[in-house]
Image (cartoon, rainbow, N blue to C red):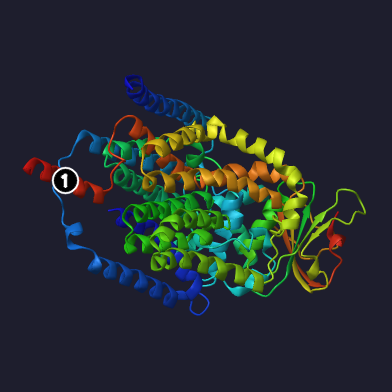
Amino acid sequence: MRICWSSLVIGAGTISLLSFCLGFVIQGILLKGMITAVCIALFVFGFGRSPKYDCRAERFKVKVVHVLLAMLVISQLSFVTWLSLHKWNLSWDGLIVWEAKATIAFRHAGALPLQYFTGGYEVSHVAYPLFLPLLEAWIYEWLGHIDQGMIKLVGPYLYLAALLLLIGSARRATNSVWVATLAVFLFGLLPICTLGYGSVSSGYADFPLAVVWLCALVHSMEYWRTGELAAARLTGVSAMFLPFVKNDGVIALFCIILTVLPKVIQERNWKAAAWMMTPGLGVLFGWHLLIKLSHVKEGDLVPFTLGNLLAHLDRTGTLVRSTIQELLTWNHWSILWPAAIVAAIVLVSHTRIATWYPLVVNALLPVLLYPCVFFFSAWVPFQAHVGLALPRLFIHSAPAAILLVSVACGSLMGMGDTSTSPNDSGAKIAESKARSNS
Amino acid sequence: MRIKTALAPALGLVLIVTFAWVGGAALISAVKDDRAEFRLYPEVSSDSFLSHIGGPHPTKTVNEMLEPWGRDRVLLVVAPATSPFSRAIYYELMILAYPRRIPAIMCDPHPGGTGSAYHPELASTNIDGLIFFGIVPGSGVTGARQVAPELYVAPYKGVPTWNSFCP
């Protein structure tokens, strides 16, 4: 089921990336047809390879917790859909930065022309990647016209993907539907993810990046648990889209690589390492090569050099203060970040490394890394850049933090079992049978 | 050990309840304070950006205004630097006008001022048309047509000094 829910994210990413790559050579009906054919082919290929026992409808008893979970999912999804369609417009970035590219791509038969990169459109941040705009352009292509109302549904679509990934991952980590329910419940109570700039309803790319990151995290957790090549492949495919959603995705990619590196080195599984790292690094390298060849100048950041870092070290105090202030802004985050720190301590002291390590790295390391970006801010004063962008950056790792808090709370309250993996469960059953036979 | 066993679930419960209470209160407050209400139709967001040109369907008005000009035309936007909406309207005009090239001059409020030019590299390019936002075209501009309460368009042929169109 976890793989099914990932397809919501991977499918959207595949459409965007294929639109970008194929758009250099084909446009219009041919581009649309080719992308559709590839998506159908991938579905048929995956369906054919999937183990048959996964496809059989399993009989299970509907319990109160299942009903509660379903009600939570439906109510939250309805709420964010209403917010997206009726309470928030595409604001500045949503329209000028992201939807603008979709409009231009639609007027160019579904593909962004090279002229766009060199034609003086810096106002719409030409150097920003294209996951969201090309997904929006895809919607325009099938509608046959530009529709700024309909593309607001991208947010709720990805919100549904996030909920399902949280459910699948929390359940997998703890063997408890109650912990999955808790994760969904807490996720719906994060104001900054629901309403405001960067949220699901805003048309910005921050929430999409958070969902893609969650997808990559879920599979990296599975890889930690099982060491299977299938999990490594899915980690790599999900992580591939991170640098294609926003340039900040490079930090997400770094965290995912850091997540899987210890296991890869421990097991010397270089094939898995290649699967997990090459796609993302390839997309990152390819995108930045295009930007460099187009001579696009991005005005928000100075080059990432040691000299610039040393020249701006005096910003440290301001960045530390701003970070702490933001993390404790309760009407953005509730108590997510203090709870995440407590959760990390709980999980590190009580669970296996396969459970806590991926969650702690992806929830808490970004809190240290993101503020460091502003050492390279070109804004004068840089504090304005921090105030505008920092809250949105933390949205990216918020789902990981929710998962961390949920798993830890579940562990504290005795819900589920984080001390065993599915593989361990089989061994324990065999062991107990052997004991009862003797 | 017994105290630890009792404290752990209590800590979990406190975290969950506090999270829910604080987050729920903030979310309800944010939704209540947000008075905005948008209808669902294709140009809802660009209409919001262009609303200060006036008229019921500003995006449609702008698209109809741009239609007569070919894709390779250069149209100069003239707008007041003092208006807080000039930049937003200019940027949205740029996007709707794609692939036409759209430089702009934001007029200085002080007479004789130079104003600030957007895409000054096009200063020596032939201008095919003029778009005025928030400024009524001077008598020297012939053929000007009002397309919206705050938007005028006029044909042009030549390489002008951009701030010559400023009041």
Q: Residue furthest left?
A: A437
- Compare residues A2 and B94 and report the one nearer the observer: A2
Where residue A326 appears, as percent x and y from the top left, is 60, 36
Where residue B90 appears, as percent x and y from the top left, is 70, 56
Image vertical order of residue A420 relative to residue A264, above or below: above
- Compare residues B138 and A371 and report the one nearer the observer: A371
Q: Which residue is mark 1?
A: A431
Q: Is residue B55 in sight in this rendering? A: no
Q: Is residue A322 in sight in this rendering? A: yes
- Compare residues A200 and A406 and report the one nearer the observer: A406
- Compare residues A278 and B123 and report the one nearer the observer: A278
Image vertical order of residue A341 relative to residue A162, above or below: above
Q: Is residue A315 left or right of residue A417?
A: right
Q: Residue furthest top?
A: B3
Q: Quadrant of the C terminus of chain A?
A: top left
Where residue A122 appears, as percent x and y from the top left, is 68, 62
The residue shown at (33%, 64%) is A229
Q: Secondary structure at mark 1?
A: helix
The residue shown at (75%, 48%) is A312
Image vertical order of residue A207 relative to residue A102, above or below: above
The residue shown at (51%, 44%) is A199
Please, what is the three-letter code of the amino acid marked with disc 1? Glu
Where residue A403 appears, as percent x and y from the top left, is 40, 42
Q: Is residue A232 left or right of residue B72?
A: left
Badge 1 density bin: few <14, some 14–19, many ≥20, Cα 10 Å: few
Query: Mark 1 — on which chain does it sit?
Result: A
